[in-house]
Image (cartoon, rainbow, N blue to C red):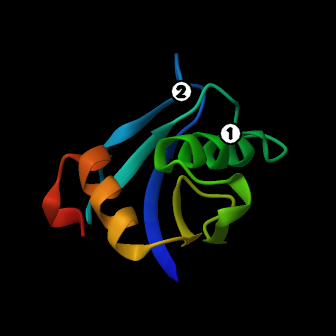
């Protein structure tokens, strides 16, 4: 199974964190310390998401927005479990 995940990236953050929402429509916020150069932020985003969702990094693929703050990722995993975890992380049941 796969799941589409919409996120907003905050590079150069003071610490790495996954949680909350931003934007319209609301997207899961992923803050990373890595700068947005040479794919460093994208790699950090995937690592943080893998940790947050308790999956492997290879389960995440950026399908849209590789060079933008707003990204769409394809996530391999159980859709029910991913949806539940997304709701916990975002704190916003309307995000789903």
Q: Nearer the viewer, residue 68 or 87?
A: 87
Cα distance, mark 1 to mark 2? 9 Å
Quick check: 90 above or below 84?
above
On the image, numbered disc 2 is attached to which residue? 16
Secondary structure type for disc 1: helix
Verify CB contact (< 8 Å) between mark 1 and mark 2.
Answer: yes
Q: Where the C terminus falls, by quadrant? A: bottom left
Residue 67 quadrant: bottom right
Q: Nearer the viewer, residue 8 or 16?
A: 16
Picture coordinates of residue 7, whole percent (x, y): 45, 57
Picture coordinates of residue 80, whole percent (x, y): 33, 72
Q: Residue at x 74, y 45 (%)?
A: 43
Residue at the far bottom: name it. Answer: 1
Picture coordinates of residue 54, whole percent (x, y): 53, 48
Q: Crowdedness of circle 2 by 10 Å Cα count: few (<14), some, many (20+)?
A: some
Horizontal side of 62 relative to 85 (left or right) equals right
Q: Residue at x 85, y 44 (%)?
A: 38
Q: Residue at x 40, y 75 (%)?
A: 79
On the image, numbered disc 1 is attached to which residue? 44
């Amino acid at each position: 199974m796969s799941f589409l995940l919409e996120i907003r990236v905050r590079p150069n953050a003071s610490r790495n964190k996954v949680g909350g929402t931003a934007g319209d429509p609301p997207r899961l916020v992923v803050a990373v310390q890595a700068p947005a150069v040479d794919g460093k932020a994208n790699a950090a985003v995937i690592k943080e998401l893998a940790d947050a969702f308790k999956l492997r990094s290879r389960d995440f693929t950026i399908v849209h927005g590789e060079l933008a703050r707003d990204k769409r990722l394809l996530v391999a995993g159980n859709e029910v479990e991913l949806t539940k975890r997304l709701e916990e992380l975002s704190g916003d049941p309307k995000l789903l």
